[in-house]
Image (tube, rainbow, N blue to C red):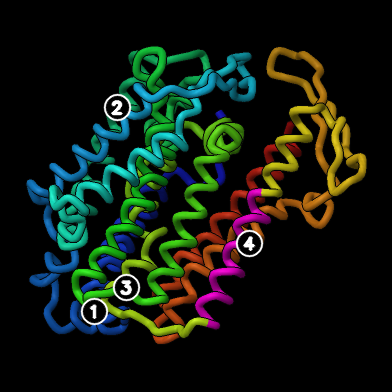
């Protein structure tokens, strides 16, 4: 198992706090005018008897929406054509094989969702109206899903990249398997991280836009900027999805409660929260400010993409390429595998990667800021995602440095 940075006995406390944050963000954005103080005053005044308003029970319609969306994305993942892509070789010597059809699945999803609204087959405003119940269902369903993953890791692991630490809590929290699959072709982490987690962000961004349109008869420029930046960022993600399969989330973190619950619950509820706020709080930015925010956000998304592109080209060509018009500088790092084999890795140290270590996190954080800032500064909560993302990426950078240092 990889070195663990979180004490095992704190996992339940941490995730229960995350659950309460998901509820609190939803309730505050939708029912408390975006004010955390107003939410706390409500709970203080009415006590636990009104806690059900903040933590609504799952409803049948919530389960139906989740089931239809999950089944649709699973079918697209399996059925759509895509290029065969090999992931990085694991420490156990396994090379995962994927079908890169994420961008096509993304296009089909958005066209289908908008068409259902346009032809009045399904109204996305229903999703917004039942968000609290949907998040409750996701929390409960994800817990069951992670229990099944734990049992699968014990009873039917998909590869030799699996195993137990001997501690139930650690195994459940961090995961039993690196590459769990159903059958040969359905990769569970691709589904949870990409096809459900990231895809739901795009669907919710459009949902918020449509809900504001139906409420006000139009869409504010602040909502348009937020929605466009989110959709461009997610488009970039699926364009680069094969590169994501080489990152820490897929290639090093096991499929457990930590990552799967985060992608199934935290990503839809927190990553889209600025747009959730804007539904009931449309802000008029004006043409100049809206275009300035939009251009700044697009630039950050491009830089984030170009950082990853440079690293991919460098790795694909084994360093025999041009970065910013010049031969790249590099670091040759030697290491030994678990089997005792000596290997080398080439680390790019020019271009964007010559400016700082983990430089690609800088434009990613700034992009999140620019799709949050259309809410302006009346309330703190629209910026919760930016703060969380900064903490997450700082922790990830530290974990990556520790892993590379050990390697």
Q: Residue 244: x and y, percent?
A: 56, 37
Quarter the C terminus occupies: top right
- The nearer-to-camera label among 1 and 4 is 4
Marks 2 and 1 in Cβ contact (< 8 Å): no
The Cα atoms of the two marked residues, 1 and 3, are separated by 21 Å
Q: Which residues are magenta?
A: 288-305
36 to the left or right of 346: left
Crowding at mark 2 (Cα within 10 Å: few <14, some 14-19, many 20+): few
Crowding at mark 1 (Cα within 10 Å: few <14, some 14-19, many 20+): some
The Cα atoms of the two marked residues, 2 and 1, are separated by 38 Å
Q: Give whichever of discs 2 and 3 has the lower sequence position.
A: 2
Q: Give whichever of discs 1 and 4 has the lower sequence position.
A: 1
The Cα atoms of the two marked residues, 2 and 3, are separated by 32 Å
Q: Residue at x 18, y 67 (%)?
A: 54
Q: Residue 234: x and y, percent?
A: 48, 50
Q: Give whichever of discs 4 and 2 has the lower sequence position.
A: 2
Q: Residue 354: x and y, percent?
A: 84, 52
């Amino acid at each position: 198992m990889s070195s663990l940075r979180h004490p095992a006995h704190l996992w339940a406390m941490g995730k229960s706090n995350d659950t309460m944050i998901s509820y609190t963000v939803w309730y505050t954005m939708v029912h408390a005018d975006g004010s955390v103080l107003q939410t706390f005053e409500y709970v203080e005044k009415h006590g636990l008897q009104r806690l059900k308003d903040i933590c609504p029970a799952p409803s049948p319609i919530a389960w139906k929406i989740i089931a239809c969306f999950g089944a649709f994305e699973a079918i697209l993942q399996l059925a759509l054509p895509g290029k065969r892509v090999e992931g990085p070789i694991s420490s156990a010597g396994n090379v995962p094989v994927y079908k890169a059809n994420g961008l096509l699945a993304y296009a089909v999803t958005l066209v289908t969702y908008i068409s259902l609204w346009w032809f009045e087959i399904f109204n996305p405003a229903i999703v917004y109206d039942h968000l609290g119940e949907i998040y409750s269902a996701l929390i409960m369903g994800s817990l069951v899903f992670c229990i099944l993953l734990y049992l699968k890791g014990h009873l039917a692991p998909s590869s030799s990249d699996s195993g137990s630490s001997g501690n139930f809590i650690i195994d459940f929290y961090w995961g039993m398997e690196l590459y769990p699959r159903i059958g040969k072709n359905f990769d569970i982490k691709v589904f949870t991280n990409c096809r459900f987690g990231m895809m739901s962000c795009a669907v919710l961004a459009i949902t918020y836009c449509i809900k504001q349109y139906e409420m006000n008869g139009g869409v504010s420029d602040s909502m348009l900027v937020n929605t466009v930046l989110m959709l461009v960022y997610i488009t970039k993600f699926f364009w680069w999805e094969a590169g994501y399969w080489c990152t820490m989330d897929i290639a090093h973190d096991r499929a457990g409660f930590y990552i799967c619950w985060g992608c199934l619950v935290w990503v839809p509820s927190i990553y889209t929260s600025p747009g959730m706020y804007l539904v009931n709080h449309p802000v008029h930015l004006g043409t100049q400010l809206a275009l300035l925010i939009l251009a700044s956000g697009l630039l950050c998304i491009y830089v984030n993409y170009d950082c990853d592109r440079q690293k991919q080209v460098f790795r694909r060509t084994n360093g025999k390429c041009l970065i910013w018009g010049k031969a790249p500088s590099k670091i040759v790092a030697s290491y030994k595998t678990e089997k005792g084999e000596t290997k080398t890795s080439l680390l790019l140290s020019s271009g964007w990667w010559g400016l700082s270590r983990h430089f690609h996190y800088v434009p990613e954080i700034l992009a999140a800021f620019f799709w949050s800032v259309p809410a302006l500064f009346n309330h703190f909560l629209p910026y919760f995602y930016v703060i969380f993302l900064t903490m997450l990426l700082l922790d990830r950078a530290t974990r990556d440095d520790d892993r590379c240092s050990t390697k």
